[in-house]
Amino acid sequence: MNAHEFLTTVTIILAVMALIGLVELIVPLFTRPSSGRSTANLGLTVLTLSFNWMLNGAAAIIAAAFALQGPGYITRLGVPIGVQLVAGVAVLDFSFGYLAHRALHVSPMLWRVHRVHHCDPFVDVTTTYRNHPIEGLWRFLFIVIPVWLLGMPPEVVVIHRLLSALNGILEHANLRVWQPLDRILSLFWVTPHMHKVHHSRDQVETDSNYGNVLSVYDRVLGTFTPTKQALAVVYGLDDVDPVRSTSLPRLLAMPFHDVEVAAHEPTTISAEHA
C-alpha cells in the first residue's frame, strides 16, 4: 500500500467514524460523559492507523511473495477462488480476531498491553483504535502465520482487514440497537451490544465475546455472553487511575508500569430510553 492508498484508506475510515459518530448522537446507548478522553483516543488512533499501514503492507507483500512461489496449498487442493476468499476471511477472523484477542486476556504479560484499550471509561467510535502499538504487532503474527501455512491469496488479507476495520468502528459505537434485531444478528455477527459486554468492568463479562467480525467462535467455544447485558454494562478497569486513562503518554507507558489501583468509584453512565 503506497502513501496515496494509505491516505485514501485513512480518509475512508475517518469518514466512517465521523458518520457513525453522528448516528451516536441520534440513538445513543448511553449518555456520553465529559471525561477528556477524546484527545488520547484520537492520538492513539493516528498511531494505530499509521502502524497498521506498515503491518498491512507487510502482510500483503508476504502473501504476494508466497503467491509468486506458485499456487498455495488450498489452491493446489483445487478449492475455487470464491471459496478460498470466504474460508480465508473466516480463518483470519478466528486467528486474528478470536485467538489473538483471547490470548491478550489470558496472558498476564499481554494483558498489560491490552489494558490500554480496556481502561477507557467510556466506549464509542473513538475507542476503536485506542490500541497500544505492541498489540498491533502481536495481532500481525496471527495474520502472517495462517497466510503462510495455507498459502492464502493476497485478496483474503485485504478483504479481512477491510471488514475488520469497518466492523470494529461499528461494534465500538455508542449505539442503541433494537434488542430483537441485535439478538438475531449476534447469532453469527459481532454486534455493538455484543462487544459492549466485552468492555464491562466485570471480569466475567470482560473475558467473553472476543470475536471481531464473526460471533460463531464465541458461541462454539463457550465464551459468549448474551447481548442484553450491554444495557447495564459499566465500562473501564478498577485498577487504572482515571487520570492515566486519559493521557496519551501515560497510555503508551502503561504496559511497562506496575498495575496501579485506582482510588475512585466506577464511572456511572445512564442508558438512554428508547
Image (cartoon, helix red, strand yellow):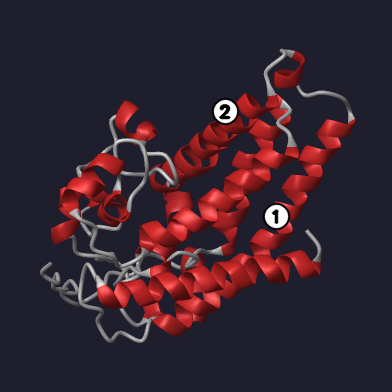
Tell me: residue 93, above or below residue 136.
Answer: above
**Can I make out residue 204 in this image?**
no
Residue 236 lies left or right of residue 4; in this view the side is left
Percent position (x, y) of residue 180? Answer: 17, 46
Work out which quarter of the rendered image holds the C terminus and state it. Answer: bottom left
Q: Which residue is under mark 2?
A: 87
* Mark count: 2
Q: Residue furthest right?
A: 69
Mark 1 residue element: helix
Task: Kindly indicate whether the residue at mark 1 contacts the one at mark 2 (C-beta within 8 angstroms).
Answer: no
**Can I make out residue 145 in this image?**
yes
Circle on res. 55: 1
Q: Kindly report the distance in space between the C-alpha atoms of the residues bearing marks 2 and 1.
A: 22 Å
Percent position (x, y) of residue 4? Answer: 78, 69
Tell me: residue 219, above or below residue 75.
Answer: below
Percent position (x, y) of residue 61? Answer: 81, 46
Tell me: residue 176, above or below residue 252.
Answer: above
Work out which quarter of the rendered image holds the N terminus and state it. Answer: bottom right
